[in-house]
Image (spheres, coloured by chain):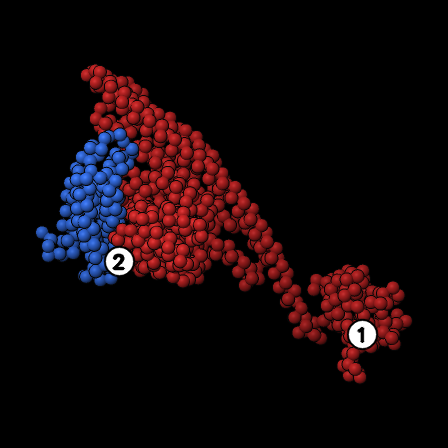
Amino acid sequence: MRFDDNMDRDQAMGGGGSANSSSDFVRKLYKMLEDPSYSQVVRWGDDGGSFVVLENERFTKSILPKHFKHSNFASFVRQLNKYDFHKVRHNNEENGHSPYGSGAWEFKHPEFKANNKDSLDNIRRKAPAPRKPPQVVDEAVPTQQMDLVNTQLVATQQQLQQLQQRYEELNIHNSILTQELIGVQKTVVNHEHVMQNVMSYLHSVDARQRRDSKAGGPFANTEENTAPSANADPAQQQISPLEDEPASPLQNASKLLHEMSADVQLNYKNLEQMSEVHNRNGAISTPPPDGRHPRAPASAGSSSSMGYAKLHGEQDAVVYPVGQTNGIDPMYSEHIHNIPYPMPSKDETIDPRVSAPAGRKKSAQVDPGWVRAPQILLVEDDQTCRRIGSKFLYSFRCAIDSAFDGLEAVNKMNAGSKYDLVLMDIIMPNLDGVSACHLIRQFDHTPIIAMTSNIRSDDISMYFQHGMNDVLPKPFTRDGLLNMLEKHLGHLKQIPDGMEPMAQNPGTSIPQSSAGHSLKDESSPTQSPSTISNWQSPGQFSGISPTQAVPPHQYMHPMHSGFGQEQSPVQYQVPHTEMGAPRQMQHRRRISEIGSDDISNDPKRQRMYDQTNPMGMQPMARPR
Amino acid sequence: MAESENGSIGLPDLGDSIDALTFEQILEMDDDEEEREFSKSIVYGFFEQADKTFKEMDSALEKNDLATLSALGHFLKGSSATLGLTKVKDSCEKIQHFGARKDENGNPTHYDDRKFLSLIRDTVKVVKADYKEVERVLKQFYRDPDAH
């Protein structure tokens, strides 16, 4: 259609100069027909009163471009029509076929005749608008729309390309991160071994010392007082009473621990840089639901810092009870801030006794807004856990099947039962969860979540090595379970309609969707007795949590508005910044939203944190 | 919410041995707050499980069977943790560790087996006492006529 426009312009210029001169188009047409070499393709009609396009295809491809600078036969015809040429129809003749062949197009105009160049001046372009308004409308609107669509297409392609680049970038970062974390994990494990060796050696030395000399106690005490940094180490203070005598070897051990912590921190430098890069780019990436590889080491890695916490600060006496702050070793909190995910704040840790009356809202039935009920296989030998787990899943509108042990689970899946998610206990009779997962992975790739209280780093890395996709620390909570479902079953969720306006106007009220409800109601309790994942980066879950579901939607938003309101497509020119911004906004919004609910509780929360039970079985910060 | 207030009023006297939040999320699953059918069946199911496990622990202690003790500790740890019975859970975890020849924090330790067995014996006493306490509290909560 642009071609038409060009020609209209040609015509306008040519015709505007002199009323007598014929239009460019007509003269070009005439000139073309004078060329005898085209006679096989286009020529004057037999009587000279018309012209015939004999071979449409060759005409379009080779002749049109030469004379009219385009290769669009339809445009050519349309142009002819504008000058009041008419296609000669042969329907009424004897055989109904054109004498020039069935594929021929014959056009005529009363003033367009071979050997009569003068009459060309009489051929005028029909006045477009007044005479044929419908046609004008037909053509003008589609042209605009086409342009619009074209621009949008280009913009979308750019956007896609940028996304692609971003994705690749993130991929690279991710693998660096992964390697980094694996390194960290190994270091920590090694240190743990070193520590054990050192400690057992020290025990023997110390025992000998005590045997040898009664003066050992005082001596040790003196040394303790003179030892420089070691006194500050909580490990020292904890170990001493534990081992029932303070001795210099233990101080040495503490020193070793300090040195180790430095090592680990060195390893984290790369991570910090990466995180900064992420932050700069405003990318808060959430791993794909089954991006097993990238996540695996990440989780394992951070969990190793938990193992570390245990090693280092004996104050967290219990290893697994998924203690509140375990995952985020307070000693390393600084690097946490560089992680582009929102980390659960320790302040949010709540003492259940206080928080329970503090306005925990219940909603026994949460509808996460599944497209269809997810099929969940719950593999658990303990009846209590199985029943509670089933009940929770049921309240999340899931369809539940259960298996008593790993063997039953493998058999069920081998027999062809299809599930969307498998929740797998680890320690079970007959066949443990890890082995079961290993077997299942030979023929099936349904996401499998380890449900276990054994979440030391080596445990976790083993789970991932055998094909598990995630870990839900036990005792699991309803919220933790729901987060897990939303994280891994995001593809079964519908994006609620209410999201878009919400995204646009941070101030507006909560979306009507149930997902929104769950966000508000379920997240205000902010605690959950065990939880989900200290060791996990919370960004992971939020990946599919209701709020996070918004950003993708948001990207589309400018598109919609572009379409609907026919705005200038300029807005696509900044897809990159747009992309970062909505997420940021989203986060801010989320905080403010939750804040409105909870901020008043914050001081309380801090108090609660101080009161937390050292023994682990505690609520901990919810990642929101 | 009325439901929340009701639940919370009932809960404080559950005491320190029970993690209120964990337990409350199970109570939330009750369709009827008077009957409390679901949570009650879970809790009473746990009572049976605990009684049985304690007996098995006693007999494993007689046989000096550390591995079985560790497994039993793990087993009861899972269900007690899920109910929020913090103290019971912690003791069970210790039993699990001792049975696996580790110290109470789960670090490999070089005691001889008699030491582990005596640690377990002590811990079983503790866990039974803790259990008695939560059983009493819970039976009271469910208005069990047996509650004293």
- Amino acid under disc 1: Gly
Colour blue, chain: B
Labels 1 and 2 touching (C-beta < 8 A): no
Nearer to the camera, A102 or A153: A102
**Residue A129 makes an appearance in the image:** yes
Could you tell me which chain the residue with mark 2 belongs to? B
State the residue lying farthest toward the front: B63
Q: CA distance from mark 1 to mark 2?
A: 82 Å
Q: Residue A580, relative to residue A337: is it above or below?
A: below
Residue denoted by label 2: B29
Q: Position of residue A333 (x, y in %)?
A: 37, 36
Q: Residue A335, relative to residue A553: is it above or below?
A: above
**Secondary structure state at the residue bearing disc 1:** loop
Asked where in the image residue A107 lies, by quadrant, the reply is: bottom right
| Badge 2: residue crowd in 10 Å (few <14, some 14–19, many ≥20) | many
Colour red, chain: A
Nearer to the camera, A359 or A466: A466
Q: Residue at x 24, y 42 (%)?
A: B68
Q: Residue at x 22, y 24 (%)?
A: A245
Nearer to the camera, B138 or A452: A452
Asked where in the image residue A518 lies, by quadrant, the reply is: bottom left
